[in-house]
Amino acid sequence: MSVLDPTDRRLIKATQAGLPLTARPYAQIATWLMLTEAEVIARLAALQDRGIVRRIAIAPNHYALGMTANGMSVWDVVDRQATTLGARIGALDFVTHCYLRPRAPVWRYNLFAMLHGTSRAEVETKRAQVRAILGGACRADDILYSTRILKKTGLRLQDG
Amino acid sequence: MTRLRQTLPEDALDACDRAILNTLQDGFPLTPQPFDDAGAALGLSGAELIARLTRLRDIGAITRFGPFFDAAAMGGAFCLCALSVPEEDADRIAGMVNSHPEVAHNYARDHALNMWFVLATPTPEGIATTAARIAAETGLTVWQFPKLQEFFIGFRVTA
């Protein structure tokens, strides 16, 4: 973590569970850390510029909003077309997370795209759209539905 | 953890709540009085926005509100991993896996590889170390699927 100075680390720890819901949240954080409000804002802006903070925003709960079906769709795409096709799949508005990953002896798929919908039928419709885009470059595919959330915590910065 | 998967009743959110969820997914101001500034665009005072966000959080419509950090940009690493767990051992193995603070989330999935979890560690070396510990504890192969490339994401939830 040498890219972070000790104050940045304290700031990340203070905000990783979320921003306080008070009129001046950055001033509130500043009092916890014995900084000024302007310093907290400037440091968060700098972290954002460096890509360490991706954004400051709300994460809606998909499930609460009715998006109860989610499937990890996985695709065995010809390597030389994987980057071009991956970019097209990632840009679809119903795809969260889209990655190229290595294959393994027990696993032939290299393109992963998370699909969300209000029902499995809706997810399957979206999956068919992905399949149509990949066309002949895709040799096999599968979809893994989540059956249980076993653990879900945000990123936690550890000591050390 | 079942609470995470419950759908809110249709009437739990009014049009204003939906507008808040849709708008604040894209970003939140980094200004001294950000709720006033964000509220103005929604026709709300800062205090009204805070009250609504508090309620949305309390009823579980929001999972997080604040900065989203990129572990890789901080010098750390993420890795998707999978196990093939015998059905009768699922709870015990899940307990072993989840006891590691490096495990950020873990899902049971419908496949021969039936347990999928994400490791987040402060250093790239931490991934291999943690995966090796989990393998030793569970006696199972920890298949690692680090991202080779991430594609632009167009996704938004429409509330």
Image: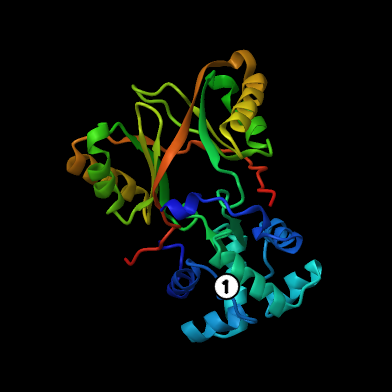
Residue shown at 64% from the left, 16% from the top: A135
Q: Is residue A38 left or right of residue B92?
A: right
In the foreground, A14 or A128: A128
Residue indicated by mark 1: A43
Disc 1 packing (10 Å; few <14; some 14–19; many ≥20): some
Residue shown at 43% from the left, 21% from the top: A108
How far across and how far down the image is residue A111, in percent? 52, 28
Residue shown at 68% from the left, 37% from the top: A91
Return the chain for callout 1: A
How far across and how far down the image is residue A58, in percent? 61, 60
Name the secondary structure under disc 1: helix
Total numbered circles:
1
How far across and how far down the image is residue B74, in percent? 46, 58
Residue shown at 71% from the left, 56% from the top: B22
Q: Is residue B126 above or below residue B42?
A: above
Residue B75: image quadrant is bottom left
Q: Is residue A21 above or below residue A56?
A: below
